[in-house]
Amino acid sequence: MSITKNLKFIREHHEDVRKGAEAKGVTVNLGEIISLDERRRGLIQEGESLKARRNKVSGEIGKLKKEGKNADAVIAEMEGVKARIQAIDADLREIEEKLDGLLLTVPNIPHPSVPRGSTPADNKEISKWGDLPDVDFPLKPHWELCDALGIIDFDRGARVSGAGFPFYVGKGATLERALINFFLDRAIQGGYREMSPPIVVNEESARGTGQVPDKEDLMYVVERDQLYLIPTAEVSVTNFHRDEILSEKDLPVRYVAYTPCFRREAGSYGRDVRGLNRIHQFDKVELVKFVHPGRSYDELESLRQDAEQLLQLLKIPYRVVLMCTGDMGFTQSKKYDLEVWAAGQKRWLEVSSCSNFEAFQARRINVRFRPANGSKPEFVHTLNGSGLALPRVVAALLEHYQTPEGKVVVPKVLHPYTKFEVIG
């Protein structure tokens, strides 16, 4: 993470950062950060001055020796300068290590349009789409349908890997693959470039997008190789352009990626973890954008529309929720959740989060663009959204399209992918 760029932002937006952290319910010691930064800059200035003096005197020593004059006093002075430079370098390493840790505790600033609040009750419903099913037979939850139809096996998955690692079987596996390909094809048609990224990342990548340390407890870690299994393709794909300068004419840069995702989901319990509601390994198609700062909120609305369109084509009822400051997360400036109606459970399930991070991630991973007018490079804004996360889409689809006989009708848009119209 770039200490200099993040400190510069905090210095220039100190009050905004303080209020933003407060709105998110995050405790940040900005006073200590500013104090350490002042010490750091003072030491850098002193060190540069001493190094300039050392370089100048080095030439003078050579000249004195060449002229046969005594250079002992000057050499002794330089020994003292050398020792001070070494002490400064040691102090700087210690200060920068402290700053690195402190800067990781500073959350992104919420956008002014984000509602203030601390719990999900403070989130704001923006819109709803589709009619909830009105049928004359009892609707079953998806786990009962899966068991009866033999399309997802939770018990065998638990024996092989543990709870939260289901097997998709027969038409269940085909349905999963069909949805992945459908989501990818729609994104590609919409101008996103497909990539197949790594599903493990190093700590620098996880830190760059904000998963570490904020969500470290939710990630699976390969300790021997010091790698993290990705909780979302966002981590790999956003780091694709790390330490690069893009051209303004190429913005927005848009990627779509399918990956399996891994989340420990520590602390989850009750009905939230039934069936596909909350599992440890799941498939997801992710949409990622690198955009011009002046257009990032238009791009957020466009991103949301791309995700919504998929649910509309599947004809699954859903709602859009604008997350409040205390519920949207550490890294986001603004976030919408798309929630589908799970008819058999009579509850809303989140299937996509569409977020604008502004320059928060870009400063951490140093992704900039060169303006067309030739001025100095600026940080891009990064955005991402699920397009879509599969487990709850499958759950809602099965529950919404079930028949009185216990079968499931496949949405018409998936017929070219599944090659069948009914499960059962």
Image (tube, rainbow, N blue to C red):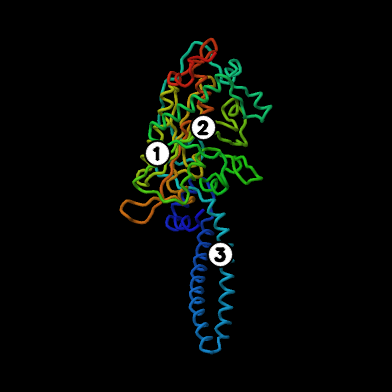
From the image, state whether disc 2 or disc 3 is nearer to you. 2
Of callouts 3 and 1, the N-terminal one: 3
From the image, state whether disc 2 or disc 1 is nearer to you. 2
Of callouts 2 and 3, the N-terminal one: 3
Relative to the observer, which residue lies in front, 20 or 116?
Answer: 20
- The x, y position of residue 204, in whole percent, is 55, 49
Q: Secondary structure at mark 1?
A: helix
- The x, y position of residue 270, in whole percent, is 62, 28
Question: In the rendered view, would you say 259 is above or below 201?
Answer: above
Is disc 3 in contact with disc 1, using a CB cutoff of under 8 Å?
A: no
Question: In the rendered view, would you say 301 is above or below 67?
Answer: above
Q: Within 10 Å of the Cα at label 2, are there few (<14), some (14-19), or many (20+) other Cα atoms?
A: many
Q: Left or right: where does residue 293 sit relative to residue 27?
A: left
Spatial separation of the CA atoms under disc 3 and disc 1:
40 Å
Q: Amino acid at mark 2?
A: Lys
Q: Which residue is mark 3?
A: 92
Relative to the observer, which residue lies in front, 42 or 49?
Answer: 49
Residue 72 image label: none
Image label count: 3
Q: Residue at position x 52%, y 20% from top?
A: 398
Q: Amino acid at mark 1?
A: Leu
Spatial separation of the CA atoms under disc 2 and disc 3:
43 Å
Q: Which residue is mark 1?
A: 300
Question: In the rendered view, would you say 368 is above or below 395?
Answer: below
Is disc 2 in contact with disc 1, using a CB cutoff of under 8 Å?
A: no
In which quadrant will I find the C terminus? top right
Of callouts 2 and 1, the N-terminal one: 2
Q: Secondary structure at mark 2?
A: strand
Q: Amino acid at mark 3?
A: Leu
Q: Which residue is mark 2?
A: 284
